[in-house]
Image (cartoon, grey):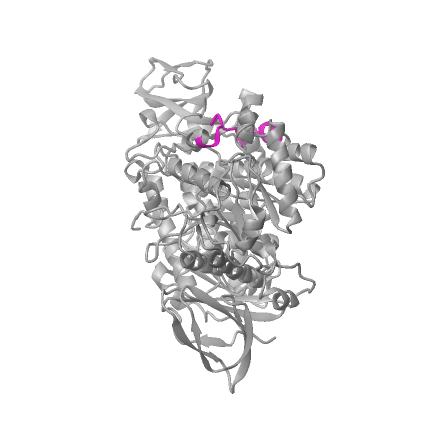
Amino acid sequence: MSVQFSSFLLPIWKLPNFKTLRIFSICISFLLPIMSASGGDTANKAATAPKALSSSGWGRVDEGFKNPPNEYRLLQYSGHHPALLPVDKMREYGIGGVMLFMQSDGYLRSDTAWENVRNNIRQIKAAGMQLWMADDNGYPSAQAGGLVVESDPAFEVRCLTPVKKEGEGTQEIRLDLPKKAEAFVAAMLYPVKEGQPVLAEGKAVPFEKDHVLATGLGGPWVLYGFAREVNNEGTQAMQTASGFQTSGRYPNLLNAAAMSKFVDLAHAEYERRLGPLAGQIDVFYSNEPNLMSLWFEFPAGSQRPGGVVFVPWDDDLPRLFKEAHGYELLPRLPALFGGNSDEEKLVRLHFYQTVAATLAENFSGRIAHWADQHGIRSSGHPLMEENMIHHVINEGDFFEFVGRMQIPACDFGMPERGAASNYWMPKLLSSIARLHGHETVHGLLDPMIFRKTPDLTPPTEDMRRNINTAFLAGLNQISTYTIWREYKADDYRKFNEYLGRLSLVLRGAEAASPVAMYYPIETFQAGFTPSPSTWDPKLWPASWKNLTGLINVYDTIAKSLVDHGYNFSWLNGKAIESATIRSGRLVVGPHEYTELIMPEVEVLPLAVAKKLEAWQKEGGKVLWVNLRPRLGNASGEHEAVRQAFASAATMPPAEVISHLGPAAPDGFRLRVDKAGQDIFIGRFMRDGRRINYVVNNREAKQSFSFSLEGAGADGVQIYNPADGSITERQLPATLDIDPSSSLFVVEKP
C-alpha cells in the first residue's frame, strides 16, 4: 500500500502561527461590522424582505424560490464584543441569521454581557432572523470560558502515558513518576518474546502514587507503569486561550460530572438569565469539542517534550471497558501504545469503542437531550472532520459522536481555484443526518483553512463555487465569518439569495443513489496508536503513515464517485447490522442500496459480515478494495469473518467505478453531454420529484446539451438559483450555466 500525506490537509498547517492568525482575523472580522459605515455599499436599502412561507411540500420551493426565507440564508458570525449588531444593515446584505457569541469580557458572569446578549437576541428575532448561539467563548467548546475547570480542578482533562523499563533476570526494578504526571494508575510486568510483551502472561505489580517497585523475571521482561497526567501544555485549548480570554484549561469530556457542570454553567444559565429559550434561541452550537490529547504546536519538528505520547483517559474507563467487552483493560494497556498483533489491535478497537460511547453520552448526547427538553436544537462541528485518524483520537467514533446532534455540522474550507480540495468531505455529515432522519446539515464556510493565503473577503464567486460542491455533498445550511461589510451590499445580497435558493430546494431532499461506502472506523480504531506530533509527518508513528494510506484509498474512491455523478452515502456497521434485505436491496430505514464499497476494510464485526453475506445471496453487490477483512469485533469472530469472504475478488480504488451500475438511479432520465468536464451532477429526491443539481465548476460560462432518456421530447422545470427564475423547457435543449453557478433540472413527477 503506497503511503502519501493527503494533499488537501498539509497546506493549511504550513502557515506560521496558523491558529493565532485565525483567532486574530476572526476577532477583527467580528469587530469590523460595528466600527464604521465606511465600508460596503448602502444601495438597495429597499430590497424586499424575505417572508415566511405558507405552503407545504414542493409548494414551499415554488413560493419561496425568488426570495428565500431567512431560515435558508446565511448565518453570519457575530463577534466577541459588547456592541449591538447592525441588524438592519445585515438585512440589506441579505443575511438570514446570526451565529451569536457572548462578549469575552465577563463571559457568562457579567450582567452587562447578559444584557448585551438579551438585546441582540431581541432585535435579531424581531427582524425574523435565525439565532444560533455559540455554546462557548470561541473554541474548543466545553470550557464555559474556563469556568468548568475553575469550579473544580478535578474536571480538567487527563491523559494516560506509559513509562517502561526493559531488562533480563530477577533484579530489582524501579520506575519513577514523570515530573508532570499526577499518579500511576496501573503497573504490569510482562515476559518478552520475539521483542514483544506477552500480554496474556503479564502480572500486576504493587505501585505507589509516585513510583513502582518490582522484581524482574527469569528471562527478558518489560515493566510498564501507566501514569495519569493533566494535559494543559501544547493543546488546542491552550493555543486559543489568549485570543478568547480563557485559561486554556480544558475539561475532560469523558468525565460525566464535568460535562454536567458545563451544561449547567453554559446552556442552563441562558435559561436562568433569559427565561424560556424557545423562540429566542434556535440552536446551540459547539465549536470543535474534542478529547484534547493531541500535541497541537505547529512549527516543523514540534512534538511533545521527550517524545511522550498520550491517550484519552478517565479513571472510570476500565470499568466501562469491562462492562462493554467482558475483559480487563489494565493488563492490556501496552496495546494502546503499540504492537501489531491481532490481540493488540482488538484491545485498541475496544478501547476507542468505549471512549466513543462515553464521549457521545457525556457531551453530544447530553447537550442534545437538554436542547430537546427546552424546545431548541443542538449542533456543532468537531475538529478535523476530514481525517479519520482524528475521528479516533478526537471523538473515538465520528458517527457515534455527531449522530447524537440534531443538526450535524462541519467546518469546510475555501481552497483557491485549482488547489486540492476534499469537496466530498461533507458526505460524512449528510450521511449521518440521513441515518438519523435529520433534514438540516450545517457547514461553516471557512475562508482561513485549506488556503495558501487566508482571505476574509474572498470574492463572492469563489464563495459560490465552494458552496456549490458543499451542497452537492449534502450540506444545506451555511455560516461564515467573512467580513461582510467589506462587500458591496448588492453583491453580498445576491450571494445570500443564491445560497438561500440552494438550501430551499435541497433541505429535506434525499440523496438518490443506491451506492454506499462503508465507514471503516473499526479499522482505524484497531490501527491507531498515539503520536508525539500532530503536524509533522516525519515524527508520526508507522500507524499514522499506514492509516494515511487508507485515507488516500477512500478519498480516491469518494472523489471518483462524486466526479462521476454517484450521490453515494456512507454507512457504518450499526446501520448495516440493523438493515433488512428486500428484493436484493439493503434497506436502511427508508433508504435502499444495491451496491456497497468496502475501502480496505481490515476489521469487520461478524454481525455486519453475516448481513452482507445474506445480502449478497439475495443479489447485493459488495466491492472489496485492496483487501478482504481478516478481523472481527472479538477474537472468536476472526476466523468466521475471514471465511465469509475468502473467495471474494478485490480491486484497486481506480477500478471501483467500472464495477458499479449506472450513476443515474432508476427513474432519473436526464442526461448531460459534458459530464465529468468540470461539471458535477447530484441527483436528489424530494416530494416525488427527481432533482438534478447540475454544477458548472469552471470560471467560464458553459453550454450543455440536456436530454431525457427514452423516446420523444418531454418537459422539465429549470430552477435557476442565480436569478430565482423558474421556467418550463422541452428537452432535448442546450442550456447555459454561468461560471461557478448551477441549475436545478427537475423532472416532472
Residue 654's place in the image compared with 100, above or below, is: below
Give residue 524's position: percent from left, percent from top: 43, 44
Residue 681 appears in view: no
Residue 95's place in the image compared with 159, above or below, is: below
257 is within the stretch colored magenta: yes
**Residue 284 image-quadrant placement:** top right
Residue 207 appears in view: yes
Position of the C terminus, as image quadrant, is bottom right
User: Left or right: where does residue 694 sit relative to residue 688?
Assistant: left
**Region of the chain picked out in magenta, as a range:** 243-261
User: Left or right: where does residue 25 sit relative to residue 577?
Assistant: left
Work out whether residue 530 or residue 419 is closer to the camera in this orientation and state it.
419
Give residue 174's position: percent from left, percent from top: 37, 14
User: Left or right: where does residue 114 sit relative to residue 337?
Assistant: right
As drawn, the residue found furthest toward the bottom would be 712
Work out whether residue 183 or residue 285 is closer to the camera in this orientation and state it.
285
Residue 391's place in the image compared with 337, above or below, is: below
Work out whether residue 281 or residue 680 is closer to the camera in this orientation and state it.
281
Give residue 171's position: percent from left, percent from top: 33, 13
The residue drawn where x is 41% and y is 43% is 389
Work out whether residue 181 or residue 444 is closer to the camera in this orientation and state it.
444
Give residue 345's position: percent from left, percent from top: 42, 39
